Image (cartoon, grey):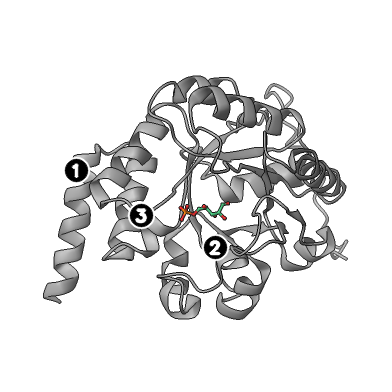
Amino acid sequence: MADLDGNINAKQFHPDVPAAQFSHSIRGAANLDWGMQNRLARILDPQTGKTVMLAFDHGYFQGPTSGLERIDLNIAPLSELADALMCTRGALRTSISPATQAGLVLRASGGPSILKDLSDEYTAMAIEDAVRINADAIAVQVFIGGEHESRSVRNLTTLVDAGYDTGIPVLGVTAVGKELTRDSRYLGLATRIIAELGAQLVKTYYCEEGFEDVVAGCPVPVIMAGGKKLPELDALTMASNAVRAGAAGVDMGRNIFQSANPEAMMRAVRAVVHEDLDPADAYELYRELSNAKVDA
Ligand code: R5P
C-alpha cells in the first residue's frame, strides 16, 4: 500500500477535457470485451490494422511437411518477423520459445489425416488449454457445403461460446473441398456464414474475380490464406491484390517456408501488407535480401 505520509490531494481532473474514446479500427470489434479486443490487437497490428500471420499447422493432418521438418530450426527464427503464428499446441510447446512476442493463433479443430476424409473434423482442443498457453485466438476449419458441414459449424459455434467465456477470439477458416469452387460466390457464402455464427476473424482463399465483394460482405476482418507454393512474385502479387481489395492481411505458410529464402520472403510480404509496396518492388526487395544473404 502506498505511504500516506505526504499524500497530495488529487486535483488534476481536467473537467474541460472529454474522457478518452477508443475508436477501434478492427472491423466488427467495437462491441467486444476489452480482453478480446486486446488479443485481436496482438494479431492485427494496431498501426496498420493488418497482419502477417505465419501458418505452420500443416502437420496436424499431413505430418512432416517440406519446410517444416524441424520447426525449431526452420520456423522459430522467423517468428519475430510475424505479427502472429498459426500453429498447433504441440508445435508451439515443443519448438517455439515462450518468450516470443508474436501473437498466437492455435489450431483447435482436427481429426482426420491425409489418409482419410479431411472434412471429418471435431474440435481438437479445450479452451482451458488455450487460456493456459495464453493464446490470442483459436482457429477452426468450417466446411460449408461439405459432407460434414453441420458438424464443422457445431465445432465453430462451440468454440465461439468457449471463446466468449474466456475472451479468446475465434478465427474461422473456410475449408474448400476438392468438389467446391473457390469463386467469390462460394467464398462470400462461407465467410459470411462463419462471421454470422460468431467468428471474430475469418480466413479464406483469394479469388481473382470479386474478392472485394467477399471482403465487403463479411462483417469481420478477412485474412487471406496462402495456399500452394507459387513463384515469389506471384505470391506477392496475390497478397497485394487481396490487401488492396480490403483483406486485413495474410496467413501464409508454404509460400514463406518453402521459399528459397523464407526470411527475405517474410520481409517482402510484410512490405506488401503493411506498407502497400507494389508487388514488383517487393519482389525486388526479396531478391536484394536474398542476394545479400548469399554474399554475406
Ligand atoms: C488452414 O487453416 C491450414 O491449416 C493452413 O494453415 C493454411 O492452409 C495456410 O497454409 P498455406 O499458406 O501453406 O496454405
149 in relation to 18, above or below: below
**Residue type for callout 3:** Lys
Answer yes or no: is residue 75 visible: yes
Secondary structure beneath label 1: helix
Q: Which residue lies most toward the left here?
A: 295
Among the two numbered marks 2 and 3 on one chain, the one whose residue lies closer to the N terminus: 2
Query: Which corner quadrant of the image does residue 133 belong to?
Result: bottom right
Residue wearing tag 2: 58
Residue wearing tag 1: 281
> x%, y% of residue 278?
24, 37
- Tell me: is circle 3 under 8 Å from ligand 1: yes
Among the two numbered marks 3 and 1 on one chain, the one whose residue lies closer to the N terminus: 3
118 in relation to 292, above or below: above
Q: Residues within 10 Å of mark 2 (few under 14, many from 20)?
A: some
> Mark number for residue 229?
3
> x%, y% of residue 50?
48, 40
**Residue type for callout 2:** His
Query: In the picture provided, is 265 more to the left or to the right than 117?
Result: left
The structure residue drawn at horizontal position 41% and vertical position 33%, both measured from the top left corner, is 242
The structure residue drawn at horizontal position 72% and vertical position 41%, both measured from the top left corner, is 147
Secondary structure beneath label 2: loop
Numbered marks: total: 3
> x%, y% of residue 194?
69, 34
> Mark number for residue 203?
none
> x%, y% of residue 291?
14, 65
Q: Nearer the viewer, residue 42 or 171?
A: 171
> Whole-Å distance between the Cαs marked 3 and 1?
20 Å
